[in-house]
Image (cartoon, rainbow, N blue to C red):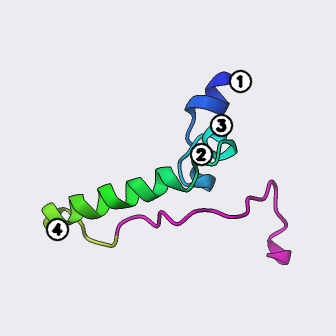
Amino acid sequence: MDWYNFEHRHSAIQFVTPSQRHAGLDTAVPANRKVVYEAAKARHPERWSRETRNWDPVKVVYLNSDKSII
């Protein structure tokens, strides 16, 4: 359980842990990653064939969502 809550980074919540999201760090961590990715792309644009990952915060998370209502 500790691994899941404190170590595993979930793709649905921008690769933060559930404990980071619960602590309100789910906006700061991806914002920092965006800065790092953009700097890396600026230093070596030849390594990037597309845009960097979308690091915008995820506001709402659904468990087993019904795709027809979204």
**Residue linked to disc 3:** 19
- N-term mark: 4 or 3: 3
Q: Is residue 67 visible?
A: yes
* Quadrant in the rendering for residue 59: bottom right
The quadrant of the picture occupied by the C terminus is bottom right
CA distance for labels 2 and 1: 14 Å
What residue would you read off at disc 4? 45
Q: Secondary structure at mark 4?
A: helix
Q: Residue 10: which numbered mark, if any?
A: 2
Q: Is residue 44 visible?
A: no
C-alpha span from label 4 to label 2: 28 Å
Check disc 1 and give the amino acid type: Met
Q: Secondary structure at mark 1?
A: loop
Judge whether 56 appears above or below 64 on screen: below
Rate crowding at label 4 as few (under 14), some (14 to 19) or many (20 or more) other CA atoms within 10 Å.
few
Q: Is residue 34 left or right of residue 5?
A: left
Distance CA(mark 1)–CA(mark 4): 40 Å
Compute the Cα span from label 3 to label 2.
11 Å
Residue 19 position, x and y percent, is 65, 37
Q: Which residue is pictured at 31% across the width and 72% down the height?
A: 50
Spot occupied by residue 26 in the image (x, y as percentages of width and height): 58, 51
Q: Earlier in the sequence, mark 2 or mark 1?
A: 1
Q: Please give the name of the residue rendered at 14% of the width and 61% of the height, measured from the top-left corner.
A: 43
- Pointer 1 residue: 1
The amino acid at mark 2 is: His
Reading the chain from its start, which is encountered first: label 3 or label 2? 2
The reply to whether callout 3 and callout 2 are in contact (CB within 8 Å) is no
Q: Amino acid at mark 4?
A: Pro
Q: Are marks 1 and 4 in contact (CB under 8 Å)?
A: no
Magenta residues, start to end:
52-70
Query: Toward which corner of the image does residue 35 lie, by quadrant?
Result: bottom left
